[in-house]
Image (cartoon, rainbow, N blue to C red):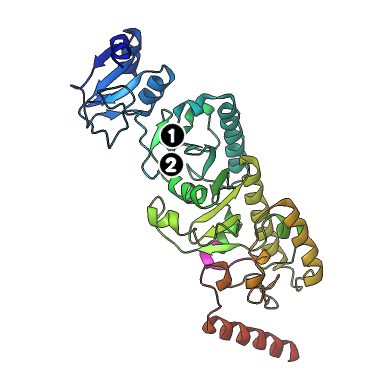
Amino acid sequence: MGELKSEMKSIDLTGQKVLVIRDARSAQVAGASQVLVCKNCVVTPSARDFLAQHNIALVVSGASKAAAPAVSGQSSTVPAYGSAHGSPAPNPRLFSTPEAEAVKKEICAVGRKLWMRQFVDGNGGNISYRIGPNEVICTPTLVSKYDLTPEDLSMVDLEGNQIAGSKARTSEILLHLEIYKAVPEAKSCVHCHPPHATAYAITGKVPPNLVIPEFEVFIGKVAISPYETPGTAEFAQTVLPFVKTHNTVLLANHGIICWADSVTHAEWFAEVLETYCWTLMLASQLGAPISYISEQKGSDLLAIKKKLGLPDIRFDTSRMKECQLSDLEVPGSIALTPSPCDGNTGKPLEADLEILVKSVTDAVMALCD
Ligand SMILES: [Zn+2]
């Protein structure tokens, strides 16, 4: 250890309240192997990146060993990316790997698709990709998805701390992170505000099933999460009851979120849902009833979906009694009250059943008139 210490060149920046990339560069030019900062020093993400890329340790002066595992002897070296909840310490180097560069390009291409299809407006919507166990590449705040470039993207850990990138990460990343923590298969999340799907989200209704095969296979039953203020932890957690059994959730009075095994596929799900909602609305104007695919044929579609490894609450046979393939559709309606089995509440509420029975009875009576 003594020999190791004698080889180290430490630059003392404990007098600074903020460490920016210029300081990091100066330290590198001076041949530093570590930079000493005070406990309350704010280190910008680009400075952290630069130090990590040049193998310069960031050492907090006077930090306790409990708070920061020591790797350099007497001082506590803080890779500046503390792992708060047992996740492995995030690795900022993942931000500049060939895989990361490819993902950044894919995110930009998907951002442009979202904008071209009018699924986002202003600086709305956000896209992310989980590139490591505790590393997520994401879009920045306040940038139109049409204008995105790979340089705009940033990387956060699973707690939302920015660990790479010069632009501030999206404020809605917490929503994505809850999904990554709950669903290990989720590699990418796309959040956007497509108008027809969002129209459902502002009425608190979900589209019915067994109308178009592609929707059954790729999406299936859509859940709707309750409204919360965007960007908050409460908002992020509203999707938790649904994300294990749904790849697409309507966010009440807001928009949608989809997750998949790639950025491109998550955007596909947004397209499938939006087109489905739009088609249902168009059909409702034709003055003729929608014809439904039979439950039996619907089972064939569900089998295809299972083979593709996509989630669907209807695979859970214990819930099938409460949650038929199609649910009970009300003739003439293109929207259903979300089934209680979409949540984690288990059994349907009696009040919901009463409403359903009454609406079906009313519809049958209307047909008899
Ligand atoms: Zn949003």
Q: Is residue 215 left or right of residue 357?
A: right
Judge by depth and name the residue closer to the eye, 77 or 283: 77
Please state the horizontal and vertical placement of residue 117, each as a whole percent of the image.
63, 45
Label 2, residues with CA under 10 Å away: few <14, some 14-19, many ≥20 = few
Please state the horizontal and vertical placement of residue 132, each as a whole percent of the image.
52, 36
The picture quadrant where one finds residue 243 is bottom right
- SS type, badge 1: loop
- SS type, badge 2: loop
Which residues make up the magenta segment? 201-207
Which residue is depicted at the point 71% across and 87% down?
Answer: 364
Identified by mark 2, the residue type is Ser
Judge by depth and name the residue closer to the eye, 189 or 84: 84
Q: Are marks 2 and 1 in contact (CB under 8 Å)?
A: yes
Image: 148 above or below 232 = above
Image: 78 above or below 342 = above
Identified by mark 1, the residue type is Pro
The residue that disc 1 covers is 90
Please state the horizontal and vertical placement of residue 357, each as a whole percent of the image.
62, 86
Please state the horizontal and vertical placement of residue 31, each as a whole percent of the image.
34, 8
The residue that disc 2 covers is 87
Instruction: Classify the position of the C terminus by image quarter.
Output: bottom right
Q: CA distance from mark 2 to mark 1?
A: 8 Å
Q: Would residue 127 be visible to someone looking at this image?
A: yes
Numbered mark located on residue 190 in the image: none
Label 1, residues with CA under 10 Å away: few <14, some 14-19, many ≥20 = many
Q: Is residue 94 left or right of residue 207?
A: left
The picture quadrant where one finds residue 158 is top left
Image: 92 above or below 213 = above
